[in-house]
Amino acid sequence: MSDLALPDAAAAPAAGSRPAAVPRHVAVVMDGNGRWARQRYMPRFFGHKQGVDALVRAVNTFADRGVEFLTVFAFSSENWKRPSEEVSGLMSLVLVAVSKYLAKMAGDGVRIRIIGDRSAVSDKLRQAWEHAEQVTRDNHRITLAVAFNYGGRWDVVQACRHAVAQGLPPEQIDEAWLSQHMALSFAPDPDLFIRTGGEMRMSNFLLWQAAYSELFFTECLWPDFGQAEIDAALAAYAQRDRRFGSLPAHPVVPAGT
Ligand code: IPE
Ligand code: IPE
Ligand code: MG
């Protein structure tokens, strides 16, 4: 089924760890487009364009490996601080990407969801998002959630606003209620959180949902993040021992005790 490079015996997880597993949900901060372009003496926009192509390839690879949900950070709440030409270039790129790739993605069995604050984007972009969601809503191979004008803090605030707007008494607000009113209510929490581009920070992505995600940082710039890099991230994940605050099922007793 897959050519996922499983860890060899020497690198296998210690006894008591969970068996190698494929994450159900992967979240990715697709960073490094600008530097990728600069390395080629090209404008940043060129890197963003290549980044879209890399995303289309990555969705298929993750789906082939058995990942059910892929959530990608495409534009953060803070990215409005960039020069206006870059921001408007990104907005038009998204429209071009939808018209160029929607039919292919729909044919590939990808269900598309957009998460983020849609109030600040143009009517045209909002309509394109709604169209993409509508056309792909019955697909089941993989769900691609594109985080656009998304911020983890925004997500928490908008869920709280729902609670207040519904007149919910404080004792009825709990973690489950908030989770059900946050942007990724349709997905389990991400198992694996990948950031390309070498920075080791979350940059306000999925702050709530990634509470127990396994983190994987790579120097690889997003446009170069292909099958080999995806398999390396999945292999690293397969070796992690996820405890969620508990203890390993069969703790390894240190020698000499
Ligand atoms: C990520 O790449 C894409 C967006 C934030 C839209 P960058 O544009 O941040 O690329 P670098 O980090 O400057 O290389
Ligand atoms: C995070 O990348 C946002 C996206 C990839 C969309 P940035 O490049 O904006 O993050 P910082 O500024 O380095 O933290
Ligand atoms: Mg960046």
Image (cartoon, grey):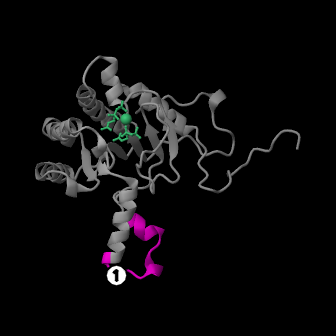
Q: Is residue 181 among the parts visible in the rendering?
A: no
Residue 116: give x, y in percent of width and height. Answer: 29, 54
Q: Is residue 167 magenta?
A: yes
Q: Quadrant of the C terminus?
A: top right
123 horizontally vs 83: left or right: left
Q: Secondary structure at mark 1?
A: loop
Magenta region, main secondary structure? helix
Question: What residue appears at the point 36 percent right and 59 percent down from the top-left corner?
Answer: 155
Ligand 1 positioned in quadrant: top left
134 horizontally vs 198: left or right: left
Reply above or below: 175 against 144: below
Question: What residue appears at the point 32 percent right and 30 percent down from the top-left corner?
Answer: 33
Residue 61: give x, y in percent of width and height. Answer: 35, 33
User: What is the residue that sits farthest to the top in this orientation?
Assistant: 40
User: What is the residue that sits farthest to the left in this orientation?
Assistant: 124
Question: What residue appears at the point 51 percent right and 42 percent down from the top-left corner?
Answer: 215
Residue 156: give x, y in percent of width and height. Answer: 40, 62
Question: What residue appears at the point 51 percent right and 33 percent down from the top-left corner?
Answer: 235
The magenta segment is 165-180
163 horizontally vs 208: left or right: left
Q: Which residue is mark 1?
A: 167
Residue 194: give x, y in percent of width and height. Answer: 45, 39
